[in-house]
Image (tube, rainbow, N blue to C red):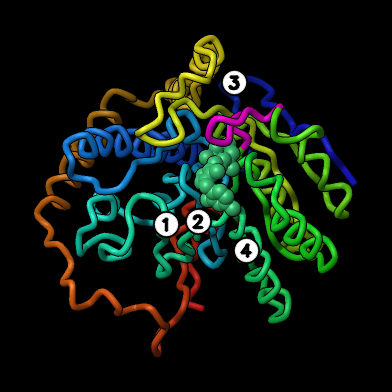
Amino acid sequence: MATGTARPAESEAAGASAHLTPDDRVGLLRAMLTMRGIEERAMTLYRQGKVPGSFYDGYGQEAVSAGATWAMAPEDRLCILHRDLAAHLIRGVPPARIFAQYMGRDGGVTGGREGNVHFGDRNLGCVGMVSMLPDMMLVAAGMAMAFKLRDEARCAITWFGDGSTSRGDFHEAMNWAGVQKLPVIFVLENNQYAYSTPTAGQFAVNPVERAAAYGFPGFTVDGNDAEAMFEATRVARERAIAGDGPTLLEAVTMRMHGHAAHDDMKYVPSELVEKWRAKDPIDLQVRRAETLDVDVEALRAGIKAEIEAGVDEALAMAMPDGDTATDRLFAEDEALLSNGNGPWSGFAHSGDDA
Ligand SMILES: Cc1ncc(C[n+]2csc(CCOP(=O)(O)OP(=O)(O)O)c2C)c(N)n1
Ligand SMILES: [Mg+2]
């Protein structure tokens, strides 16, 4: 089974995929700028005491969720983790609902039942994550099993961190997916740390190499290049839809902030952070957009205005009615999961609910 590095870009401006239109390439930049802008603004709200609990972000990792989600069709299903906000945005969750989610408002995705980590809009094909890591690998494999049994041309994807590769659930999901040739994509978000544990303390052999032992390919991808992430995921999806089984993608990136807002990450050498700052995924996509004659400053200004409007909208929303706390614990006469937007031009057609 293949293990290796997904094809690098021929040149920075040319990008990493012939399957992206200029609009797609700007769309990827927009998604990443929106993710970063929302998370930076939300950190301020957190410090003002308006976001309960803690606050987790994906600063510097925006390309991993943006690029991979761009390759997914509306009828595909996503298990999104705590540093993957761009996936929610691309599937169609607007900034106001994200801020409302973080602040526990009625208009948030879970209507005040969770904060900034465990949520997913099932009406957009997104499954809210459970905290035990990496259990969403098993959920994604289960959904892929259903697609296979129903003979549907659909695919499931999930993200998980380097830390969770040491758990038994990783083995179970990889093994079953390999045995059954399930249409599932596993994205290992290798951001060098699991809380304070560096990868050197996590595994002796890079987990991307384990894919071969389960009978399917594993590829290392530049996780700070949204177009490379898109291309690797597009290929993995085509393989899944063709019935050839799963793919493991190792997205190499860096956790640029602490594990969460409370963590000053004193244990991370500052030279390492600075080395990765020079490889910022947004800077790369900005340089590409400039070769397409995009007015990046106007794009940034428009996104900033959307974010501020989203904050105002969310702040004006009511807190949930406490009497509804036990509502929605069980599914009642409603579709469990509906489709998302999947705006990649190859999926311009949007399927009906399923
Ligand atoms: C089974 C399990 N053990 C411990 C935790 C607590 N925990 C939450 S996030 C985290 C670190 C995860 O690191 P990694 O998988 O590398 O993801 P990252 O946060 O770096 O994106 C830990 C230990 C958990 N959620 N689940
Ligand atoms: Mg990690």
Which label number is shown at residue 172? none
- Asked whether 243 falls inside the magenta stretch, the response is no
Which label sits in the foreground, 2 or 1?
2
Tell me which residue sits at (69%, 51%) in the image.
Answer: 167
- Dot 1 falls on a residue whose secondary structure is loop
* Earlier residue among tags 1 and 4: 1
Residues shaded magenta: 190-200
> Does residue 241 lie above or below 273 as drawn?
below
* Earlier residue among tags 3 and 2: 3
Q: Amino acid at mark 2?
A: Ser
Q: Amino acid at mark 3?
A: Glu
- Dot 3 falls on a residue whose secondary structure is loop
Tell me which residue sits at (45%, 63%) in the image.
Answer: 340
- How much space separates mark 1 and mark 4, taking CA atoms? 16 Å
**Total number of numbered discs in the rendering:** 4
Task: Check if mark 2's residue and mark 4's residue have beta carbons within 8 Å.
Answer: no
Which label number is shown at residue 118? 1
Q: Quadrant of residue 328?
A: bottom left
The residue beneath circle 3 is 12
The residue beneath circle 4 is 140
Tell me which residue sits at (55%, 27%) in the image.
Answer: 254
> Does residue 291 lie above or below 131 as drawn?
above
Horizontal side, residue 131 vs residue 240: left or right: left
Q: Measured from the top left, where is residue 56 in percent x and y?
A: 39, 40
User: Ligand 2 is found in which quarter of the picture?
Assistant: top right
Tell which of 337 and 99 is nearer to you.
99
> Does residue 145 lie above or below 245 as drawn?
below
- How much space separates mark 3 and mark 2, taking CA atoms? 37 Å
Task: Check if mark 2's residue and mark 1's residue have beta carbons within 8 Å.
Answer: yes
